[in-house]
Image: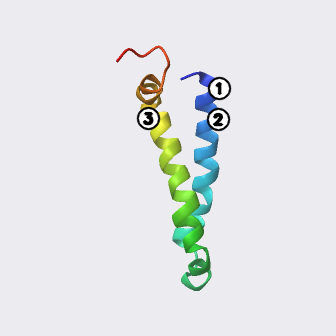
Amino acid sequence: MSPTKRTILRWIHILFALPLIGYIYGPPEEVAQYASMFRYIYVPVLFLSGLLMWKGHVIGRLFSPSRKP
C-alpha cells in the first residue's frame, strides 16, 4: 500500500473515531438518538479502514489483476 493511501486511511480512521468517544462518554438520553448512525456508518467505516491499514497488502494482492489462479 502506498504511503499516501495509508495516510488517507489513517485520517479517515481518526476522524470517524472521534465521535465514538462522545458516544461512549455522552449522556445516555442524548446518545440514544445517534445509535443507528454509529451502528451502520461509523463502526463499519472504522472496521474497514482499520482492516485495510492492518492487512491492506494481503487484500490488495487478492484483487490484483496480475494474480495467477
Q: Residue at x 58, y 30 (%)?
A: 6
Q: Residue furthest left?
A: 69
Q: Residues within 10 Å of mark 3 (few under 14, many from 20)?
A: few
Instruction: Choose top left, top right, bottom left or bottom right for residue 67.
Output: top left
As rendered, which of 37 and 19 lies closer to the eye?
37
Q: How many marks?
A: 3
3D distance between C-alphas at marks 2 and 1: 6 Å
Identify the residue under disc 1. Answer: 4
Q: Residue at x 54, y 71 (%)?
A: 25
Above/below status of 8 relative to 26: above
3D distance between C-alphas at marks 1 and 3: 15 Å
Q: Residues within 10 Å of mark 1 (few under 14, many from 20)?
A: few
Q: Residue at x 64, y 35 (%)?
A: 8
**Mark 1 belongs to which amino acid?**
Thr
Q: Residue at x 47, y 13 (%)?
A: 66
Image position, residue 57 (x, y; %): 45, 25
Q: Residues within 10 Å of mark 2 (few under 14, many from 20)?
A: few
**Mark 3 belongs to which amino acid?**
Trp
3D distance between C-alphas at marks 2 and 3: 14 Å
Which numbered tag is attached to residue 8?
2
Instruction: Choose top left, top right, bottom left or bottom right for residue 37.
Output: bottom right
Above/below status of 26 relative to 68: below
Asked if the residues shown at circle 2 and circle 1 are in contact, with their CB atoms under 8 angstroms apart, the answer is yes
Which numbered tag is attached to residue 54?
3
Q: Earlier in the sequence, mark 2 or mark 3?
A: 2
Asked if the residues shown at circle 2 and circle 3 are in contact, with their CB atoms under 8 angstroms apart, the answer is no
Q: Is 62 displayed left or right of 17 in the figure?
A: left
